[in-house]
Image: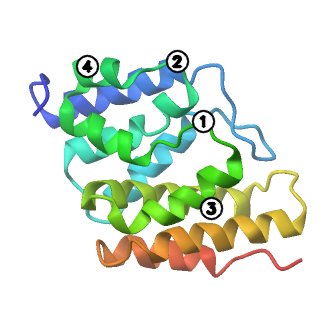
Amino acid sequence: MTNYPNPAALLLEAARFSAERHRNQRRKDADATPYINHPLSVAALLAEHGVADGEILAAALLHDTVEDTETSFEELEVKFGARVTAIVAEVTDDKALPTAERKRLQVEHAPHKSPDARLVKIADKTSNLTDIVHSAPGWPLERKQDYFDWAKDVVDLMRGINAELEAAFDAIYAQRPTE
């Protein structure tokens, strides 16, 4: 467990930390929304679908901090504990690798993720697809379809962890762009 007196304190500190680290970043969506909206969406999806574990929700809030900011795993561990950091580590891509290799590795590693990391990863993919459907980046149709299909490949290898969350993914995947 972490050094926080209760799960609410942990979650609020994770949200504050994530907001601070992502403060100058924007999403790739049409509205260029503040980046913090994404980790908040991932955590909210988990909570809406029955996940009440504060450390999993904190990891959802922090899931992109190492990948997309100057945050280190060591820093996360000191501040948020070993379990939160382990979940974040499992869902973090190595940005030194080319995009195609990172995507390939996500598919390859998906069935081997811990249950906690699977929850965060499925919520992350659900949030990303939702953003594409509702505020599409200026991507060509083929790129959007490829992203949807790749996300489904990843999620399909992690199923069996939370039927409600998986149904939410399936519902947004059903809105896959076709034109």
Alpha-carbon distance for marks 2 and 3? 27 Å
Of tags 1 and 2, which is closer to the observer?
Answer: 1
The amino acid type of the residue labelled 3 equals: Thr
The amino acid type of the residue labelled 4 equals: Lys
| Numbered tag placed on residue 52 in the rendering | none
Contact? badges 4 and 2 (CB < 8 Å): no
Alpha-carbon distance for marks 4 and 1? 23 Å
Q: Position of residue 47 (x, y in %)?
A: 32, 56
- Quadrant position of residue 171: bottom right
Contact? badges 1 and 2 (CB < 8 Å): no
Query: Residue placed at 34% from the left, 60% from the top?
Result: 119
| Numbered tag placed on residue 95 in the rendering | 1
Q: Secondary structure at mark 3?
A: helix
Of tags 1 and 3, which is closer to the observer?
Answer: 1
Query: Residue placed at 60% from the left, 36% from the top?
Result: 95
Tell me the crowding category of disc 2: few under 14, some 14 to 19, or many 20 or more residues within 10 angstroms, Cα based.
few
Alpha-carbon distance for marks 1 and 2? 12 Å
Counting residues from the start of the chain, the first of labels 4 and 1 encountered is 4
Q: Position of residue 5 (x, y in %)?
A: 9, 25
- Quadrant position of residue 4: top left
Q: Is residue 21 above or below residue 54?
A: above
Q: Is residue 130 above or below residue 38?
A: below
The amino acid type of the residue labelled 1 equals: Lys
| Numbered tag placed on residue 70 in the rendering | 2
Q: Secondary structure at mark 2?
A: loop
Counting residues from the start of the chain, the first of labels 3 and 4 encountered is 4
The residue at which mark 4 appears reads as 79
Alpha-carbon distance for marks 3 and 4? 31 Å
Task: Please state the total of marks drawn on the protein image.
Answer: 4
| Numbered tag placed on residue 130 in the rendering | 3
The amino acid type of the residue labelled 2 equals: Glu
Q: Position of residue 155 (x, y in %)?
A: 48, 70
